[in-house]
Image: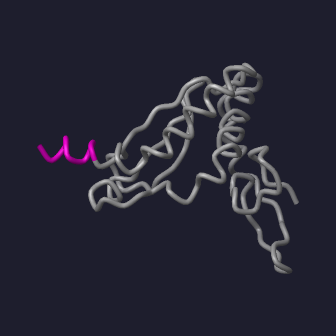
């Protein structure tokens, strides 16, 4: 019963987010992008909410804590969804061309960026500092 309730909460919390993804998925398929499917999951450990990929599927992972406490993990990221899809697509393409190690190392690269007159050292996947929807933060 508790597991079913958690599943219902997870789907309720990200319903509008998922609908946005489905619209973008249709657009992505028209352009034959590397991400061709989406899956929603709930973490079993104490991980924060995150995005990743498996094959050509983008995984949207709700945190266990947020699911249990009825918190919306993804409500604030809607403006970044195109960049997130692009970012995971870049991972998929790099993995196909160069291999998994090289693909995974993309998120370890850090750059210096300026934001509101201040300089920050951030990873390439920090969408808050992106200047476009490419999925990569550039200096």
Looking at the image, which is closer to me, 138 or 111? Answer: 138
In percent of width and height, residue 88 lies at 65, 37
Give the quadrant of the C terminus.
bottom right
**Residue 135, image quadrant:** top right
Q: In this rendering, would 81 be left or right of 86?
A: left
Q: In this rendering, would 117 be left or right of 86?
A: right
Q: Residue at x 69, y 24 (%)?
A: 34
**Residue 131, image quadrant:** bottom right
Q: In this rendering, would 8 be left or right of 94?
A: left
In percent of width and height, residue 128 lies at 70, 62
Q: Is residue 13 above or below residue 54?
A: below
Q: Is residue 137 above or below residue 19?
A: below
Query: Which residue reaches farthest bottom?
Result: 117
The stretch in magenta equals: 1-8
In percent of width and height, residue 138 lies at 85, 55
Looking at the image, which is closer to me, 49 or 8? Answer: 8
In percent of width and height, residue 66 lies at 35, 58
Applied colour scheme: one colour
Q: Is residue 93 above or below residue 85?
A: above
Q: Residue at x 50, y 38 (%)?
A: 19
Give the quadrant of the N terminus.
top left
- Main structural element of the magenta stretch: helix, strand or loop? helix
Q: Residue at x 27, y 42 (%)?
A: 7
């Amino acid at each position: 019963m508790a597991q079913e309730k958690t599943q219902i909460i997870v789907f309720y919390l990200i319903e509008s987010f998922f609908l946005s993804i489905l619209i973008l998925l249709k657009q992505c398929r028209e352009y034959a992008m590397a991400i061709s499917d989406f899956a929603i999951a709930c973490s079993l450990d104490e991980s924060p909410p995150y995005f990743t990929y498996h094959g050509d599927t983008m995984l949207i992972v709700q945190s266990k804590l947020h699911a249990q406490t009825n918190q919306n993990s993804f409500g604030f990221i809607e403006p970044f969804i195109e960049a997130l899809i692009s970012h995971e697509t870049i991972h998929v393409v790099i993995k196909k061309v160069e291999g998994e190690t090289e693909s995974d190392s993309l998120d370890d690269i850090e750059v210096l960026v300026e934001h509101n007159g201040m300089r920050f050292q951030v990873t390439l996947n920090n969408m808050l500092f992106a200047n476009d929807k490419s999925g990569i933060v550039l200096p």
